[in-house]
Amino acid sequence: MDTRRKAVRDVLVQVNGVILGKERLTLEVLAALLAGGHVLLEDMPGVGKTTLAIAFARLLGLEWKRVQFTPDVLPSDLTGFSVYHREAGQFVYQPGAVFCNLLLADEINRTSPKTQSALLEVMEERQVPGEGKTRRLPEPFFVIATQNPAGAVGTQLLPPAQMDRFMICTAIGYPDFESECAMARGADSTRRTDALEALMDAETLCAIRREVEAVFVHDAIARYAVRLIDATRRSPYLESGASPRGTLALVRMAKAAAWLQGNGFVAPADIAEQFLPCTNHRVQLSVRARMENVDRETVLKQILEETPRPKLQEKPRA
């Protein structure tokens, strides 16, 4: 286990050498991948969303594909289709882009709702049905999707039910001054990602996921996670709270965070740290919140402060 954890930390170091000044963000994305979840990166063009996804794909040694979503991308481009071969006298199935370990879905909110739904169904089921046969996707299978902010030209908002399929939704943001200066002095991002070499493979990543799943969750910790999620459903500032899928995502992310810390159990701090990344995209502000100019992050932080943590002995953090 220590060898695998060291390999994961080496991956993190390499990614932080490509995406400068965003150590917390890269840790969240890595935790989501170890927990078996999908990631949505939402931000302005040019801040490094695609570079981050490519860096993880190369370092984790995964078979990866990239789809640049446009209005003319069809569901069959993702799931595959059958072509009639005259010589063989039969239809032959041609796999689509989802048949890989890591799919980079670039600018997912520029394509049609039908294509979005096809991808998000595959994300949930991890299989492609059709033509009387169900085809399983390779293991592991992750999606790192990027989208430009709502209101950008040519974009359309992902519905809440589809946003709920992503384990976390986060923004990269602009780099700080010193990090951007370092970027200006160094090589461009394309050359930095081209130089990356795999530090593990798909089999190792699957073994790590099993270790993460085996991290112990005390009953008091599970109840703490449920109380936090339940509070989002009762807040007057939220029109709709997080779903039970959000509860599962929160616990799985906390397990991954605990594993990265070298712990075999989930602590209250692990749940608290992952609460915002796991729920920020799953809740909708109420009319009252919009009238009072209250944002989602403020509401969620208040819920976190007002919900008592269980009194368990925690191992000091590194």
Image (cartoon, helix red, strand yellow):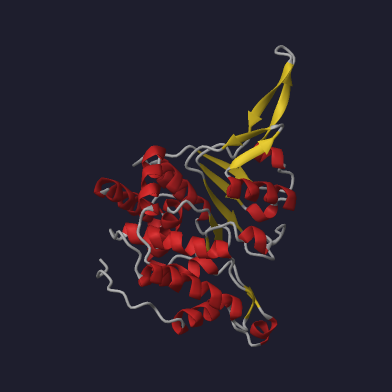
On the image, the x and y values in percent for residue 239 come to 66, 77
Residue 116 visible: yes
- Between 97 and 214, the residue placed more toward the observer is 214
- Between 193 and 187, the residue placed more toward the observer is 193
Give the residue at x 71% y 60%.
156
- View extreme (front): residue: 219
* Residue 23 in the figure: left or right of residue 156: left
**Residue 296 image-quadrant placement:** bottom right
**Residue 197 image-quadrant placement:** top left
Give the residue at x 45% y 71%.
223
Relative to 78, is 287 above or below? below
* Total numbered labels: 0
Give the residue at x 69% y 61%.
159
* Residue 14 in the figure: left or right of residue 99: left
- View extreme (top): residue: 87
**Residue 150 image-quadrant placement:** bottom right
Q: Quadrant of the C terminus?
A: bottom left
Relative to 230, is 186 above or below? above
Relative to 150, is 136 above or below? above
Give the residue at x 42% y 58%.
26
* Residue 301 in the figure: left or right of residue 309: right
On the image, the x and y values in percent for residue 154 come to 72, 57
On the image, the x and y values in percent for residue 286 come to 67, 80
On the image, the x and y values in percent for residue 89 come to 74, 14
Residue 20 visible: no
